[in-house]
Image (spheres, coloured by chain):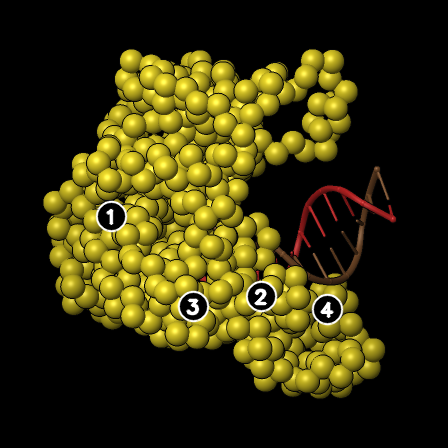
Chain colours: A yellow, B red, C brown
DNA sequence: GGTTGACGCGCG
DNA sequence: AAAGCGCGCGTCAACC
C-alpha cells in the first residue's frame, strides 16, 4: 500500500482527554507508547497540522485514533486543519462487536455502544451520579481510548477475514472524515433559484396557501362536492372520497391513479405540490440554507447495511426537482458523478459471476442482460435484476427472476443463499465483513410459537411470513452493504486526491465554504452511489479525472483483478441538474 | 400539553 | 399493477 492511500499502515496517534483536563496525544508504534504530548484545545489544531505535514512529506503518514470523528474533527476543520486518516473507535467498535463474536472483551464494553449522545434520562442520571461520569466510562478519557483501541486491535485478527476487516474499518473511518468535511464545506445552494422554482411550481404566495395549490384544492373540493374538505388529512380525505363514491382503501397516489374521476387529477397534482411545499418549501430554505450553503448532517454507518443516514435537512431525499438550485459559486463548477447500476455490478463481482460481469461491461447492465437473451428488453432486465436483489416473488418482477437464475446462476446463488440464511435466523456478511443484525424478537417469537407442539396453522403461516421478510432483508443486505463499501472506498480515495490539488488564489476561494475547503476542489455531496465535487473552474477537469480514477481504485481495492467495471455518468456543469 | 405511530412520499 | 430492500421527514390523530 502506498503511503498516500487511505488504507496505509500509518503511524498511529491517539487523542484523549486527561483526567485533569487538557488533551493528551500518545504516539504509538507496534510495541506501544513511543511519545506523549499534552496540549490545550487551542494548541491542538496547529499540532495536528504539523504532524500531518511531517507524515505527508516523508513519514508513513498519521492515523489519528479518537473516540468519535463527529466530536473531534469539526473543531479541527473550523481551525482550517484537515487530516488524511483516522480510526474512529465508536464506528469501528460497532462493526467489530457484531462481526467478531469471539471478541469477548470488546463485546463486553457496552459503554461503546450507541452514539455516545446521552438521552434525557441518561443525562439526568449522569447529573446525579455520585461518581463523576467523566471517569466512569467516558469514551474521551485517554485511558479509555487506549483500552478500547487495544480491544479492537485484539479483535481484528479474530475476524473471519482480517485483511478485509482492516479495510472496512479504514473505509468506515474515512467516511466519517468525509461526512464531517462535507458538512463543514456545505452544499452550494442558490436560494434565489430555489425560490424561483417554488414560485413556478406552487404559485405565488399571497399570505396563505400558494396560488396554484389553492386552485387545485378548490378543484378537488368542487369535484367531491365538499366545499370545506381539508385535503391534508388522509382520514378526512378518505371519507370524502368514499362519500363521492370513490371506494379506495387509502389515499396513496398509486391507488388513486387507477381511479377515473374528475377529482383525481387535481388531487394527485395537489399532493405533488403539497409535498414540495412541506418538505422543501420556504420553511426548509429558512431553516437549512444560510449564506449560500445547505449544511445537512450526515450519519455515517447510520443504516445497518453500512449506508449513511442523515439527520436534519433530509439530505438524502433532496427531490430531483430542486437539483437545479444546487449551484456552483461564480467561477466554480459542479462535477457530478453517479455509478450506473452499482448494486448488480457489486453482486457480479462478489459472486465471481463472469457472465453477469460480461453483460455489465462497458455498457448499461440492463441492456447487456437483454442482449444476452436472458430477457427480451432493457425494461425487463431492470425489473428482473431489482426483483432478484429485493426478493420479489410476484408480479412482473417476480415472474422474471427465474430467468436470471438460469442465466446467472452464480450471482443468483449468492443472493438466494443470503435469503435462505436470513429465513433460517442466520447472519450474513458484506464483502468486507460487516454483518447483518441477529434475528429480532418478532422473528424468534414467531419461530418458537410455530415449532412448539400443537402450533396452529396460523402460527406456522405467520412464522413463514416473518421468515421470508427476514430473508428479503438479508438478501438485500449483502448487496446494499457491499455497494456501500464500494462507495466508501470511492470517497476515501477521492478526498485524498482532491486534497492534493493546489490552492487557488484567495480571491477565487469559495467564500462561504469552510475555510479548509475554500480554495480547492472538494466533495460537496454524497448520495449512496453519486458524488458531487465543487471545484474551481480550472480544476473541474482534473477533479472529474480524479473521480474516475478513484472509482477504478475502489473496484480494484474490493475485487482485485475480477473483471467488473464501474462506469460513471459524469457531468461538469453549473448546477447538479442533469 | 407533549409524545408516538401510521401514513404518504421523497431519495437510492 | 405496486409486487420486492434501505432510509428521513412532515402531517395528522390518537394517546398519555
Labels 2 and 4: the sequence-earlier one: 4
Residue A265 is tagged as: none
Question: Mark 4 or 1, which is nearer the eye?
Answer: 1
What is the chain identity of the residue bearing mark 1? A
Residue A308, how many percent across, how many down? 45, 47
Which mark is first along the chain, 1 or 2?
A: 2
Marks 3 and 4 in Cβ contact (< 8 Å)? no
Work out whether residue A516 or residue A132 is closer to the camera in this orientation and state it: A516
Q: Do labels 3 and 2 touch, CB within 8 Å? A: no
- At x 71%, y 29%, the residue is A123
Q: Secondary structure at mark 1?
A: helix
Between label 2 and label 4, give the one nearer the viewer: 2
Q: Position of residue A344 (x, y in %)?
A: 28, 53
Provide the chain ID for the residue under circle 3: A
User: In front here: A407 or A93?
Assistant: A93
Residue sitting nearer the eye, A548 or A213: A548
- SS assignment at label 2: loop
The 10 Å Cα crowd at callout 4, few under 14, some 14 to 19, many 20 or more, is: few
Q: Is residue A482 visible?
A: no
Q: Is residue A408 above or below residue A143?
A: below
Badge 2 and badge 1 in a common chain:
yes
Which is nearer the N-term, disc 3 or disc 4?
Answer: 4
Place residue A212 in its image quadrant: bottom right
Residue A575 in the image: state x and y as whole percent.
42, 73
- At horizontal 78% and vertical 80% (from top left) the residue drawn is A207
A491 vs A294: above or below: above
Q: CA distance from mark 2 to mark 4?
A: 33 Å
Select label 1 or label 3 by which is in front: 3
Earlier sequence position, callout 4 versus callout 1: 4
How far apart, in angstroms, are the residues tagged by discs 2 and 1?
35 Å
| Quadrant of the rendered image containing residue A333 | bottom left
Find disc 2 in the rendering and name its residue.
A291
Amino acid at each position: 500500500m502506498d503511503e498516500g492511500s487511505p488504507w496505509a499502515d500509518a503511524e498511529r496517534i491517539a487523542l484523549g482527554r486527561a483526567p485533569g483536563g487538557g488533551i493528551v496525544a500518545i504516539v504509538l508504534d507496534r510495541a506501544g507508547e513511543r511519545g506523549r504530548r499534552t496540549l490545550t484545545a487551542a494548541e491542538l489544531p496547529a499540532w495536528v497540522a504539523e504532524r500531518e505535514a511531517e507524515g505527508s512529506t516523508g513519514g508513513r503518514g498519521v492515523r489519528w485514533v479518537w473516540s468519535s470523528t463527529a466530536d473531534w474533527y469539526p473543531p479541527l476543520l473550523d481551525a482550517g486543519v484537515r487530516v488524511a486518516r483516522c480510526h474512529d473507535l465508536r464506528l469501528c467498535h460497532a462493526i467489530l462487536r457484531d462481526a467478531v463474536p469471539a471478541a469477548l472483551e470488546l463485546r463486553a464494553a457496552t459503554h461503546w455502544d450507541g452514539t455516545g449522545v446521552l438521552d434525557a434520562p441518561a443525562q439526568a442520571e449522569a447529573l446525579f451520579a455520585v461518581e463523576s461520569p467523566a471517569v466512569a466510562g467516558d469514551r474521551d478519557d485517554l485511558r479509555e481510548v487506549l483500552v478500547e483501541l487495544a480491544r479492537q486491535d485484539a479483535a481484528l485478527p479474530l475476524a473471519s477475514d482480517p485483511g478485509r476487516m482492516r479495510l472496512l474499518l479504514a473505509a468506515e473511518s474515512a467516511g466519517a472524515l468525509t461526512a464531517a468535511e462535507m458538512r463543514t464545506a456545505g452544499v452550494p445552494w442558490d436560494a434565489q433559484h430555489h425560490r424561483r422554482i417554488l414560485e413556478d411550481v406552487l404559485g405565488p404566495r399571497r399570505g396563505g396557501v400558494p396560488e396554484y395549490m389553492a386552485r387545485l384544492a378548490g378543484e378537488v373540493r368542487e369535484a367531491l362536492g365538499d366545499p370545506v374538505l381539508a385535503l391534508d388529512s388522509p382520514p378526512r380525505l378518505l371519507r370524502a372520497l368514499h362519500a363521492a363514491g370513490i371506494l379506495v382503501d387509502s389515499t396513496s397516489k398509486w391507488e388513486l391513479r387507477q381511479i377515473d374521476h374528475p377529482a383525481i387529477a387535481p388531487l394527485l397534482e395537489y399532493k405533488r405540490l403539497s409535498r414540495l411545499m412541506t418538505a422543501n418549501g420556504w420553511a426548509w430554505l429558512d431553516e437549512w440554507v444560510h449564506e449560500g450553503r445547505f449544511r445537512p448532517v450526515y450519519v455515517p454507518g447510520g443504516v445497518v447495511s453500512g449506508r449513511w443516514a442523515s439527520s436534519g435537512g433530509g439530505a438524502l431525499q433532496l427531490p430531483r426537482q430542486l437539483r437545479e438550485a444546487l449551484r456552483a459559486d461564480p467561477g466554480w463548477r459542479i462535477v457530478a458523478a453517479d455509478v450506473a447500476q452499482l448494486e448488480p455490478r457489486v453482486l457480479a463481482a462478489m459472486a465471481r459471476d463472469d457472465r453477469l460481469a460480461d453483460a455489465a461491461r462497458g455498457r448499461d447492465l440492463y441492456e447487456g442482460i437483454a442482449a444476452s437473451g436472458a430477457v427480451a428488453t432493457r425494461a425487463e432486465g431492470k425489473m428482473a435484476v431489482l426483483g432478484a436483489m429485493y426478493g420479489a416473488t410476484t408480479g412482473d418482477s417476480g415472474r422474471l427472476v427465474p430467468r436470471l437464475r438460469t442465466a446467472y446462476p452464480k450471482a443468483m446463488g449468492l443472493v438466494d443463499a443470503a435469503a435462505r440464511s436470513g429465513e433460517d435466523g442466520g447472519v450474513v456478511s458484506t464483502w468486507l465483513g460487516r454483518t447483518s443484525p441477529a434475528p429480532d424478537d418478532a422473528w424468534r417469537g414467531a419461530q418458537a410459537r410455530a415449532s412448539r407442539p400443537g402450533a396452529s396453522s396460523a402460527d406456522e403461516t405467520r412464522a413463514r411470513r416473518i421468515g421470508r421478510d427476514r430473508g428479503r432483508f438479508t438478501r438485500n443486505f449483502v448487496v446494499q452493504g457491499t455497494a456501500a463499501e464500494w462507495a466508501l472506498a470511492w470517497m476515501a480515495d477521492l478526498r485524498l486526491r482532491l486534497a492534493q490539488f493546489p490552492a487557488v488564489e484567495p480571491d477565487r476561494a469559495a467564500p462561504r465554504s469552510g475555510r479548509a475547503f475554500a480554495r480547492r476542489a472538494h466533495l460537496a455531496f454524497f448520495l449512496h452511489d453519486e458524488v458531487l465535487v465543487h471545484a474551481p473552474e480550472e480544476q473541474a477537469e482534473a477533479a472529474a479525472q480524479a473521480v474516475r480514477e478513484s472509482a477504478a481504485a475502489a473496484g480494484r481495492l474490493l475485487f482485485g483483478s475480477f473483471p467488473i467495471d464501474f462506469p460513471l455518468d459524469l457531468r461538469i456543469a453549473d448546477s447538479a441538474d442533469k
